[in-house]
């Protein structure tokens, strides 16, 4: 008996311990179940799973969203974020992690399923890339001809920078009378003018500026050319060693380069190594070489961009020679500046001028022309006056004596047009007859005389009546009364445009049978604009001054191609 009691007592003690252990274990499991949302099977069972909304939308590929699930017990108790299994009906649209983090994969709709035993809850996931940025392929389009087309493209991207593969784009023209646009972004020029093409993708848009214009005037210089469009845009191309193109560089351009695009230009002229132009606002600018002050800005510093002339009076026209420039002001007076070594400024002395300087006359002037070292102008009396170098009789006064102020032609007429070349001068009278005088070594006077120079106006040998005339270095071109173009004189580089490189002592027609609005002779090349606004150049092309993207000599008119985009 004594031996039995201790064993019984020990068993009783062990039983109590076991009961206590089981009670503590049960209580712990209950507490754990409460913490885990009654998820141990010993707590009240779950009756349902649910989401706070029926769907979510993701607007960017790669965008994420953390789902949260709610549960209810049979006793209508609430539990947040019970442990569930997550799955996506279509993982190519959106995937879901073990913790309920949804990630957008591609556009479309799928469902995310939360599962707990036999219970499930579904939520719709829409992946729709919302464009937040839209870029158009071309910011500006410059059409040369009515009927020209340009294909525009647009790229849309979402907030994370993903490109939308098939955005819903809407193309709109603000002025369909100027340019139309198709649903695919194909723009067609309809008429001269300016419009904007807008492209929209939902709540974002982008814009392309459209200009439909023609050439108005093209002025060939020495190794470069400038031209102005009917849209008042100025383009220059060719040699640029002194910044005479005006784009801020000294880089040569083989095609027209737009300059000062924020300005509206009324006129442009290109000389040897500098250029000048006048805005529609009547402000005047020059740029390029300035070693003798030919820019008229008060210094001799070169400028690679248009720099305003230091002159208070509005200038009606500007013409330039080798190293000087002259203009007619709004008051009908003449101002000149730059080099004056032969009196080409007409100021009465040989002093160079860094600023526009008045010619002291009582005359009112209507037209002016600047040769390399001489200047001529027509007064409102229809009479011509010239000054400067007269070595070859280019002043037309019957002598070869230089003049440092305006000197009247010996043989006067009623003159309407005047043009000055290197060492010769040409003019048209009221009757439509053309006359030239000065150097004639290349037969640039176009007369029957065999003399190498002639100091009097000599009639151009032709049956034509003339409406325009232009004197180049050693060749001359003009338009007759039917707007046909003729050239004569030096033809070393094909600058006469007759498909040859033979000098011509009298006018020959320019190849192509075009009807011309304007024609101008440069140093070794010639340019013109047809009635329909198409620009052509021909002759020397060593520096791509013809604007045809090559350096090939052209003996017939070659169409200028502007940089559209």
Image: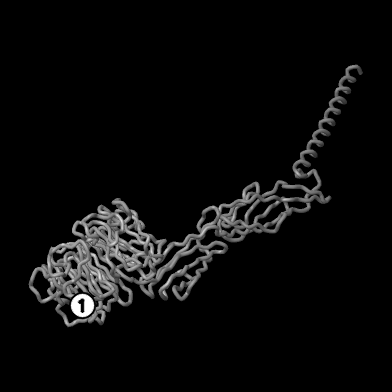
Residue 237 at what x, y percent from top left? 29, 61
Q: Residue at x 56, y 52 (%)?
A: 62
Q: Residue at x 46, y 62 (%)?
A: 136
Question: What is the number of callouts on the image?
Answer: 1
Q: Residues within 10 Å of mark 1 (few under 14, many from 20)?
A: some
Residue 470: quarter of image? bottom left
Between 546 and 122, the residue placed more toward the observer is: 546
Residue at the far top: name it. 2
Element assignment for label 1: loop
Between 288 and 564, the residue placed more toward the observer is: 288
The quadrant in which the C terminus is found is bottom left
The quadrant in which the N terminus is found is top right
Residue 254: quarter of image? bottom left
Left or right: residue 313 compared with residue 54 = left
Q: Residue at x 35, y 72 (%)?
A: 214
| Residue 70 to residue 564: above or below | above
**What residue would you read off at disc 1?**
413
Left or right: residue 242 compared with residue 233 = left
Residue 244 at what x, y percent from top left? 29, 57
Q: Is residue 306 visible?
A: no
Residue 379 at what x, y percent from top left? 27, 72
């Amino acid at each position: 008996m004594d031996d039995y009691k201790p064993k019984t007592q020990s068993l009783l003690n062990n039983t109590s311990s076991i009961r206590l252990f089981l009670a503590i274990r049960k209580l712990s499991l209950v507490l754990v179940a409460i913490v885990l949302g009654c998820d141990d099977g010993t707590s009240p069972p779950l009756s349902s799973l649910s989401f706070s909304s029926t769907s979510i939308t993701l607007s960017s590929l790669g965008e994420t969203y953390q789902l949260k699930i709610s549960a209810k017990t049979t006793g209508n108790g609430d539990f947040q974020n019970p442990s569930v299994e997550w799955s996506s009906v279509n993982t190519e649209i959106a995937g879901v992690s073990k913790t309920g983090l949804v990630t957008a994969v591609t556009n479309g709709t799928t469902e995310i399923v939360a599962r707990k035993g036999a219970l499930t809850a579904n939520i719709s996931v829409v992946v729709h890339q919302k464009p937040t940025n839209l870029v158009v392929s071309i910011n500006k389009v410059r059409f040369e001809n009515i009927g020209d087309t340009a294909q525009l493209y647009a790229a849309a991207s979402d907030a994370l920078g993903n490109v939308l593969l098939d955005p819903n784009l809407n193309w709109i023209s603000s002025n369909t009378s100027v340019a139309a646009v198709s649903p695919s972004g194909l723009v067609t020029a309809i008429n001269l003018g300016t419009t904007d093409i807008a492209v929209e993708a939902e709540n974002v848009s982008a814009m392309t500026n459209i200009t439909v214009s023609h050439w108005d005037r093209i002025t060939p210089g020495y190794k470069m050319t400038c031209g102005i469009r009917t849209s008042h845009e100025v383009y220059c191309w060719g040699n640029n060693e002194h910044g005479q193109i005006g784009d801020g560089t000294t880089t040569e351009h083989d095609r027209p380069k737009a300059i000062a695009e924020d300005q509206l230009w009324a006129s442009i002229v290109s000389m040897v190594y500098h250029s000048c132009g006048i805005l529609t606002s009547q402000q005047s600018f020059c740029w390029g070489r300035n070693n003798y002050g030919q820019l008229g800005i008060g210094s001799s510093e070169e400028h690679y961009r248009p720099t305003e002339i230091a002159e208070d009076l509005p200038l009606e026209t500007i013409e330039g020679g080798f190293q000087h420039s002259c203009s007619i002001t709004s008051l009908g007076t003449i101002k000149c500046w730059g080099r004056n070594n032969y009196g080409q400024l007409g100021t009465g002395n040989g002093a160079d001028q860094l600023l526009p300087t008045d010619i002291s006359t009582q005359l009112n002037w209507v037209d002016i022309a600047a040769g390399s070292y001489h200047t001529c102008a027509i007064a409102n009396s229809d009479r011509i006056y010239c000054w400067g170098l007269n070595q070859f009789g280019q002043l037309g006064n019957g002598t070869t004596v230089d003049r440092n102020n305006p000197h009247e032609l010996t043989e006067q007429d009623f003159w309407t047009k005047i043009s000055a070349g290197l060492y010769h001068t040409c003019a048209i009278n009221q009757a439509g007859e053309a006359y030239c005088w000065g150097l004639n070594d290349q037969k640039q006077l176009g007369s029957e005389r065999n003399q190498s120079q002639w100091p009097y106006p000599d009639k151009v040998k032709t049956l034509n009546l003339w409406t325009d005339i232009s004197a180049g270095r050693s060749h001359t071109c003009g338009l007759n009364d039917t707007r046909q173009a003729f050239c004569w004189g030096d033809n070393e580089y094909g600058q006469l445009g007759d498909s040859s490189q033979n000098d011509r002592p009298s006018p020959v027609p320019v190849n192509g049978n075009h009807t011309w609005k304007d024609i101008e002779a440069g140093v070794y090349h010639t340019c013109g604009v047809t009635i329909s606004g198409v620009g052509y150049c021909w002759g020397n092309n060593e520096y791509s001054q013809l604007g045809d993207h090559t350096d090939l000599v052209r003996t017939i008119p070659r169409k200028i191609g502007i940089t559209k985009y």
